Image: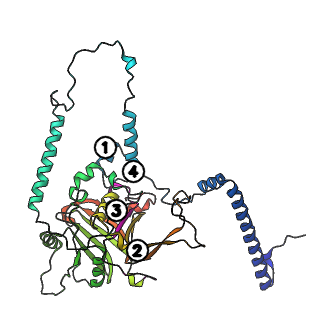
Amino acid sequence: MASFNPLKIGNKLKRQQQQQKVKKQKETTKRDDRFRRRRHEDKNPELREARLAKNVPATIDSKRTWDEANADDEAEGRLGLSVDVLHTKRRKVEEEEKQVPDEINPEDHVGEVVDDEEPAAVSGVENGDDGDLDELDSMLGSDDSDDEAEADAPAKQDPPDRAPSEAPSAAASAATATTDLNLTPDALIARFPSLFNPNTDIDPKVLVTTGLNSTLHWEAQLLTSLFPGSAYIRRTAHFRSYKYSVREICHYATNQAYTHVVILNEERKKPKGLDIVHLPAGPMFHFSISNWVEGARLPGHGNPTNHYPELILNGFRTPLGLLAAHLFKSLFPPRPEIQGRQVITLHNQRDYIFFRRHRYVFRDKRGTEKSIQGTDGKLMKGVEEIRAGLQELGPRFTLKLRRVDKGIQWRSGQEWVWEAGAEKVRTRFSL
């Protein structure tokens, strides 16, 4: 007898009915297997843990490759080097632990003759070692140069009067576990001292403007709602007026005690680029913008308030990524106002930085909702009956870092430039 093939049924309606019957039978079998597996895993939780550990999806992020570099290159913090800073720090700590000598047992040294010699000088000065003196001289020289730079810089103005925060944050802007800003290489900090060691007593002051002959005045005005203490100044488009260059704008902003200049670039009457200058002398970051959506076009959007937002930096793991993370951190006040319940998220994934702004609220868990789970898949203790709700405020857009200039604009030289052929290797990322 020939085997039955439902695809060879001549009647179309009968063929559809047979296919629906087979599909329903497969779904029923899959559902029964799922419930049977759940009953077994409830009795033996180790089976569930083993299954979850085995069924990990393979993604491009999980297949990410890192550059092989020696310890000197990693310590220098080269921006073009894709090195996991967290792994480097962990390895350095392990090496320091290995170098720690074991505890000395006094009983093992009984009866030994010790020469009456003077103990070696700890600082190395009495032994004629000038290495530490050179280090002290270099440190003093750096302090003097910093003082001269502060003397040349214009006097900083006091931040505008604001109502004090009812619940100020005890720490600086929040950062997730994947972005540890304390792991920045020392050489990178020495190369950008003003960016990594800002004056936390003064809130940032941002000047927002556009390119020449731009029509994105409304979009640029939206950026002032993102950065507290910012102001938008239009660049004139009159053909008889003087066209101020970016260097002249930065010089004016420095004299007016601004800390950053943000320039919104345009292409076909849409936001296409974002340039951020860290005053007074750089560096300057060039980003491209894609997927710009205003808050008014988001379904169920909310209206932002004037509170200082919290900041979440996620996924910045290389020296270049930490440099970009510190730039974003310097754009926002270090003490967020918690009562506003506003949070700005900068999530880096595959060298694309996703910008989102939300308002959050904590509410009671409904009966049909699940409890909050941690990264390990287990329930978090203490918040079993609490859920968090989010309302997006907008705007939302995606950034991609293209270039980092040493000073202001291309003529000053480049610290890092994005290469078009770098995306051919899909498992290597710069940030």
Instruction: Tell me if label 4 and label 3 are in contact, CB under 8 Å.
Output: no
Q: Amino acid at mark 3?
A: Glu
Q: Nearer the viewer, mark 2 or mark 1?
A: 2
Q: Residue 280 sits in which quadrant?
A: bottom left
Per the rendered image, the range of residues in magenta is: 298-319
Q: Nearer the viewer, residue 314 or 211?
A: 314
Q: CA distance from mark 3 to mark 2?
A: 33 Å
The x and y percentages for residue 412 are 18, 62
Q: Residues within 10 Å of mark 3 (few under 14, many from 20)?
A: few
Q: Are marks 3 and 2 in contact (CB under 8 Å)?
A: no
Residue bearing the label numbered 2: 358
Picture quarter containing residue 54? bottom right
| Apparent side of residue 210 relative to residue 170 in the rendered image (left or right) | left
Tell us which disc is closer to us: 4 or 3: 4
Residue 242 or residue 324, whichever sits in front: 324
Q: Quadrant of the C terminus?
A: bottom left
Q: Earlier in the sequence, mark 4 or mark 3?
A: 4
Q: Quickly name the residue at label 1.
A: 72
Q: Earlier in the sequence, mark 1 or mark 4?
A: 1
Please identify the quadrant where the N terminus is shown: bottom right
Report the Cα–Cα distance between label 2 and label 1. Answer: 41 Å
Q: CA distance from mark 3 to mark 1?
A: 24 Å
Dot 2: element: strand
Residue denoted by label 3: 419
Residue at mark 1 to residue at mark 4: CA–CA distance: 16 Å
Q: At numbered mark 4, what does the secondary structure look like: helix, strand or loop?
A: helix
Indicate the position of residue 210 as horizontal and vertical percent values.
Answer: 24, 78
